[in-house]
Image (tube, rainbow, N blue to C red):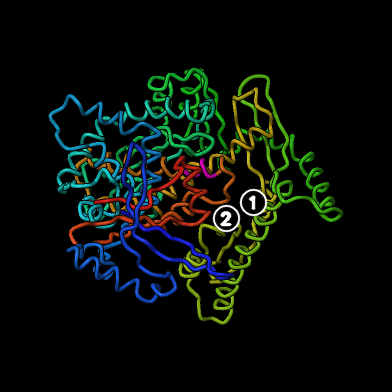
Amino acid sequence: MFLRRTKVRRGNIIYEYVRVVENYRKNGKTHQRVIANLGSIKSLKKDVANIIKGLCRICNREDLNVENLKTRGSPRYGDILAARYIWKELELDRLIAERMKHTKVKIPVELVSFLMVVNRLVDPKSKLAISRWYKEKIYLPELEGANFAPHDFYRSMDCLEKMKENIEVFLYNKLCNLFTLKLNLVFYDTTSSYFEGEGPSMAKHGNSKDHRPDKHQIVIGLLVTDEGIPIAHEVFPGDKPDKATVVKAIDDLKKRFNLKRVIFVADRGMVDKTTLDYIKDQHYSYIVTLRKRHLNEAKEAIKRAANDLEEKRKNYEEKRKNEEEDKRKKKEPLFCEYRPKDGPRYLVCLNPEKKKDDEIYRASRIEKGKRKLEKIKRLVETGRLKDREKILKKATLALDKTNRKYFSYSSSEEGSFSYSLVRETIEEEKGLDGIFIIKSTAYDLSPQELIRQYKNLSQVESAFKEIKDFLHIRPIRHHQDYRVRAHVFICVLSYLLEKILEKRMGEAHLDMTAREALDKLDDIRIAKNQIGPKTLLCPVQGDAEHRKILNAVGIKSIPRVLLS
């Protein structure tokens, strides 16, 4: 039986009625007959709710009465669904499941691993808290009836950590197919992450990039593409120098990924002559920057470039006065190249805006130092400070490492005090204002390309910032080395999902970051509506922008109702 709307014309007026009809077959044909007339639609409007309630009561179907509907929660769905789609697109579900097929582990390691990774992505919590979080805060069809205990998460971490190297190689090959990835340029950097308390055995005191030398830490090395997609990472003891981690990164590229020709890009602090020679021995090229304290080796290049760069700087300033240049061109550094007959090439670059900043900063440090030394001079002249040793000690303490090099000061046995500027140091610094030097054995790249790839090194810095600030690598609550390695791996996998989401946004020409897309998808929740013994799961359908994000990921639609 079903309802049918019927129209009846009486004169110039059309009346609409509601009838209950049913289909029946006669002589092999389908016919309809009226079971009951419910009256005109106009008269029914005020009574329709009472009629439905009455029918539910008479037919003992109170579960259909909307007044009995109770909403039991609204777990997140949109962002989880998008992350799950990318996870499956990378075939991580298949890979991990196959790896676990012939083990004695009975828990679904793949699904539990995904829960830990997606938790880092959208709502970072401890592994203990995740065992409650997934039941109450998110929805996935695969989680129906799942009941994972905290030890299931720890067991899955252990399994995941053992698969790390195989997963990284598998993902590299998969990414090459998905995005026609060409790993001819790789970027490498390290960071540190500290522990509250002792931490595991690999946690040591070292060079803290979190400015916490008092804490035990680990060192993390990360290799990414020029788009910032993570390829491989390694966790080292906290006292491992940066330079000592590079050989492991190079060996990974050579042996695990079988890469024949690669340009290795790193900050100058990551490498020394031995490391650069090792890179060369592997038939790889490199792009590194020289720190100012290491500029002696490029002295000839700087000397040759000085006049040319000054001329280019003047032309640049003149152009800025006379014409409106676009913002991109304003930020392009000026450069001069020096290629010795043997050995690496040097690119001496000048950033005019940075040159001004350096001048202003130095002037402020000198002015601050002058004020403090003048104050000491007045104390000496008024007789309030007389002892020579005390005068010199006070002057030393008055200056700091940012301005001490600019001053020379002395005090006589009689207790007088004088100071002067070290003009040679100031003039030497002025010649290096706004200067940075790129050293490279990538002879086939143009100077502009060298500069662009040097700037791309910030991709690794962005990765570490994201892993620390948004994916919350800290606090690390584990006390075994292998669990710490697993925790870092989970954070890197989470970052990989984020970068692929960001890439999908770009391909769809959506002007938003992955983080903004995830925040937007958080609007798509599941309303858990209970009517009697049944639970109806009703996803929020979202607006046009939500649909664009989901379509960019590859999700064409979401169901209107899910039964539980």
Asked if 282 appears above or below 470 in the picture, the reply is above
- Asked if disc 1 and disc 2 are in contact, CB closer than 8 Å, the reply is yes
Residue drawn at point x = 60 percent, y = 29 percent: 440
Q: Quadrant of residue 307?
A: top right
Q: Nearer the viewer, residue 114 or 322?
A: 114
Separation of marks 1 and 2 at Cα, in angstroms? 7 Å
Q: Residue 459 appears at what percent x and percent y? A: 51, 42
Answer whether residue 168 is magenta in the image: no
Residue found at the far left of this picture? 104
Q: Nearer the viewer, residue 124 or 60?
A: 60
| Span colored in magenta | 501-505
Amino acid type at image mark 1: Thr
Residue drawn at point x = 35 percent, y = 42 percent: 219
Q: Is residue 66 left or right of residue 254?
A: left
Q: Residues within 10 Å of mark 1 (few under 14, many from 20)?
A: few
Q: Nearer the viewer, residue 239 or 17?
A: 17
Answer whether residue 504 is magenta in the image: yes
Q: Is residue 545 left or right of residue 303?
A: left
Mark 1 lies on a secondary structure that is: helix
Asked if 130 appears above or below 160 in the picture, the reply is below
Amino acid type at image mark 2: Lys
Q: Main secondary structure of the magenta part?
A: helix
Residue drawn at point x = 39 percent, y = 37 percent: 221
Q: Residue 311 appears at what percent x and percent y? A: 82, 43
Q: Is residue 493 left or right of residue 431?
A: left
Q: Which residue is mark 2?
A: 405
Q: Which residue is mark 1?
A: 425
Q: Nearer the viewer, residue 425 or 92?
A: 92
Q: Is residue 123 visible?
A: no
Q: Residue 75 appears at what percent x and percent y? A: 31, 57
**Which numbered disc, 1 or 2, marks the residue that appears first in the sequence?**
2
